[in-house]
């Protein structure tokens, strides 16, 4: 009988135990986390292979979340939530990092109050930041409803080799003196032309997705009955102050006479990008129940106004009229102070942040708008004016301040 070496037996036992242990560890190995991409194209087709001739295996649409199975040059193999597997062009998907950026933007502005509402003119992409060359993700359809949250201005990219158009600068120095000193300006040597600017709006759609849209691709909601009174300006906000009853209004809706007519606060601005204010005119339109038409009850122009506005109802704490203690339709807005410099857009975000503004509050008392001041005898502070005020008006304003 052969002798058995105890050391060999022990070594064999240890080897067997280690082998079993490793096999057990591999059995409980954690599966790698799935990687995802998101469809940025309107629609795309999945193919069974990357080749000139291939078979369709599925269809995906914008915003859809796909599991990454394999990567190749310019293509990604993915699986849809429906179990479809196929190859898609890499340029038609966004990675998780961009999706996370859009989610962070959504959460950042989740509680922001809408400035006004608008609709898309055509199919348009949401961008992560102002600029046509920035990353984009969600595709909006024509006519999609939006809430506008804020405006930004950036310089329009210059096409290589294209001539830079000469534009007048927005102005500098004190805003209250904007446009003054034409002779002095004429003597100044001509510098490089100011860059062409473009406006972008931060928007939120009906699903809650948030991003930046080029201003030329959206239309602010404004009733057709007011557009005719815009006088060549752009309506950037129309807010209902109150409703009046007119059984003979003459306005039809599906063949039925509309008897409840809204009265509006409207904000207007020139059709120009890169302005250092959001609006330069405020108008209140009331409904004349005898003539069955809109008329202007209040108008203020040549101001540097900033969104948002506040619409509600107020009393006049210092008024002496019988209706002073009654809650009546009211609105407030901010304008640039007369001793403030013209604001410039932030070089990174493109957002304007005026250094000093004045809040103005008015009440609609019947057919008249009256300003509510802070206290009796209070003189309204000086305001900035984008264009120089006529000399007569300037002298009258100076006398009032005295």
Image: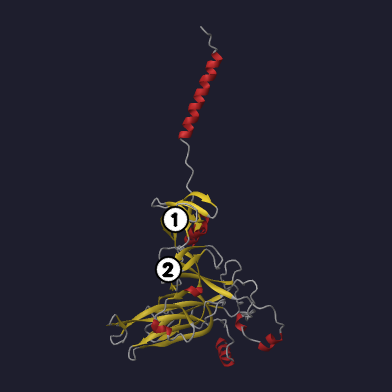
Residue 90 pos. (x, y %): 52, 56
Q: Position of residue 26 (x, y in %)?
A: 48, 34
Label 2 secondary element: loop
Report which residue position mark 2 lands on.
141
Mark 1, residue position: 46
- One can see residue 320 in this view: no
Evaluate whether residue 105 shows in this view.
Answer: yes
Residue 136 x/y as whole percent: 51, 63
Q: Residue at x 52, y 23 (%)?
A: 15
Residue drawn 69% across the image and 87% down it: 186
Q: Is residue 135 left or right of residue 169?
A: left
**Which residue is depicted at the point 50% across and 61% down?**
105
Check the image and tell me how it is coloured: secondary structure
Identify the secondary structure beneath mark 1: strand
Above or below, comparing residue 82 to residue 176 in the picture: above
Q: How crowded is the residue under tag 1: few (<14 C-alpha within 10 Å), some, or many (20+)?
A: many
Of badges 2 and 1, nearer the viewer stands: 1
In the orientation shown, which residue stands out farthest toward the bottom? 392
Q: Earlier in the sequence, mark 2 or mark 1?
A: 1
Q: Residues within 10 Å of mark 2 (few under 14, many from 20)?
A: some
Spot the residue most to the front.
53
Q: Image quadrant of residue 170?
A: bottom right
- In-front residue for pair 154/48: 48
The location of residue 388, given as percent across then percent down, is 59, 87
Q: CA distance from mark 2 to mark 1?
A: 23 Å
Determine whether 200 is above or below 208 in the image: below
Above or below: residue 353 compared with residue 226: above
Disc sitting over residue 401 in the figure = none
- Viewport quadrant of the C terminus: bottom right
Along the viewing direction, whichever of 356 and 385 lies nearer the viewer? 385
Q: Which residue is nearer to you in this view: 226 or 110?
A: 226
Furthest-top residue in view?
A: 1
């Amino acid at each position: 009988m052969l002798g058995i070496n105890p050391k060999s037996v022990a070594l064999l036992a240890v080897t067997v135990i280690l082998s079993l242990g490793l096999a057990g560890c591999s059995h409980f190995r954690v599966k790698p986390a799935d990687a995802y991409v998101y469809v940025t194209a309107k629609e795309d087709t999945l193919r069974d292979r990357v080749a000139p001739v291939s078979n369709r295996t599925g269809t995906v649409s914008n915003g859809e979340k796909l599991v990454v199975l394999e990567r190749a040059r310019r293509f990604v193999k993915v699986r849809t939530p429906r179990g479809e597997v196929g190859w898609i062009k890499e340029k038609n998907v966004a990675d998780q990092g961009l999706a996370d950026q859009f989610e962070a933007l959504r959460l950042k502005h989740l509680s922001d109050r809408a400035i006004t509402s608008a609709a898309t003119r055509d199919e348009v992409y949401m961008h992560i930041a102002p600029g046509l060359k920035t990353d984009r993700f969600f595709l909006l359809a024509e006519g999609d409803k939006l809430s506008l949250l804020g405006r930004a201005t950036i310089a329009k990219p210059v096409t290589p080799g294209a001539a830079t158009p000469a534009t007048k600068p927005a102005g500098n120095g004190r805003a209250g003196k904007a446009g003054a000193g034409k002779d002095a300006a004429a003597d100044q040597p001509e510098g490089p032309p100011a860059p062409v600017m473009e406006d972008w709006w931060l928007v939120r759609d009906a699903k809650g997705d948030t991003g930046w849209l080029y201003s030329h691709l959206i239309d602010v909601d404004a009733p057709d009955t007011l557009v005719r009174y815009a006088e060549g300006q752009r309506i950037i906000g129309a807010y209902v102050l109150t409703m009046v009853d007119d059984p003979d209004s003459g306005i039809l809706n599906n063949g039925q006479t509309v008897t409840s007519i809204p009265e509006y606060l409207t904000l207007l601005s020139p059709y120009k990008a890169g302005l250092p204010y959001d609006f330069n005119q405020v108008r209140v339109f009331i409904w004349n129940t005898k003539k069955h038409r809109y008329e202007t009850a209040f108008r203020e122009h040549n101001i540097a106004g900033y969104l948002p506005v506040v619409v509600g109802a107020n009393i006049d704490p210092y008024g002496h009229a019988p209706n002073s203690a009654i809650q009546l339709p009211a609105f407030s807005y901010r304008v640039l102070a007369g001793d403030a410099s013209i604001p410039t857009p932030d070089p990174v975000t493109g957002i304007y942040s005026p250094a000093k503004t004045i809040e103005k509050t008015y009440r609609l008392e019947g057919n008249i708008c009256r300003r509510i001041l802070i206290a009796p005898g209070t003189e309204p502070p000086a305001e900035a004016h984008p264009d120089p005020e006529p000399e007569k008006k300037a002298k009258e304003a100076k006398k009032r301040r005295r």
